[in-house]
Amino acid sequence: MPKRILTGTVTSTANTQTVTVQVERRFKHPVMQKTVKRNKKYRAHDEAEKFAVGDMVRIIECAPKSKTKRWEVLAD
């Protein structure tokens, strides 16, 4: 099964080797047929700590790194 890759914005770098990434998804409401935006935050592993707040990053699924980290930042 392929690993998911998501694109989002870094919202926090408060913890060491960890960034919080906010991912926005858009979908059409099933009844109202209006485009709806939903946001979700993911904690991702950033080994080099090279990303800052406001950066656009891509994250990929990985094996659990800690209690809350299940994603890691793709180095582009």
Image (tube, rainbow, N blue to C red):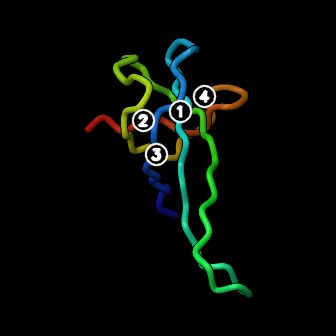
Q: Is residue 31 above or below residue 73?
A: below
Q: Earlier in the sequence, mark 2 or mark 4?
A: 4
- Marks 2 and 3: in contact by CB < 8 Å? no
Which residue occupies 52% across, 46% down? 61
Q: Is residue 64 above or below residue 23?
A: above
Identify the image quadrant of residue 50.
top left
The spot of residue 37 in percent (x, y) is: 60, 62
Task: Select label 1 or label 4 by which is in front.
Answer: 1
- Marks 4 and 2: in contact by CB < 8 Å? no
Give the Cα separation between the discs numbered 1 and 3: 11 Å
Query: Would you say 62 lies left or right of 32 here?
Result: left
Question: Circle 1 is placed at which residue position?
Answer: 44
Which residue occupies 62% across, 41% down? 41
Inspect the image, locate mark 2, and give the three-letter code of the amino acid beneath it: Val
Give the position of the C terminus as an image quadrant. top left
Q: Earlier in the sequence, mark 3 or mark 2?
A: 3
Inspect the image, locate mark 4, and give the three-letter code of the amino acid beneath it: Lys
Task: Select label 3 or label 2 by which is in front.
Answer: 3
Give the Cα separation between the discs numbered 2 and 4: 12 Å
Furthest-left residue in view? 76
Q: Secondary structure at mark 3?
A: strand
Q: Secondary structure at mark 2?
A: strand
Identify the image quadrant of residue 31.
bottom right
- Marks 2 and 1: in contact by CB < 8 Å? yes
Query: Would you say 33 lies left or right of 58 here?
Result: right
The spot of residue 67 in percent (x, y) is: 72, 28
Query: Would you say 34 lies left or right of 61 here?
Result: right
Question: Circle 4 is placed at which residue position?
Answer: 65
Q: Secondary structure at mark 1?
A: strand
Which residue occupies 52% across, 30% down? 11
Question: Circle 2 is placed at which residue position?
Answer: 73
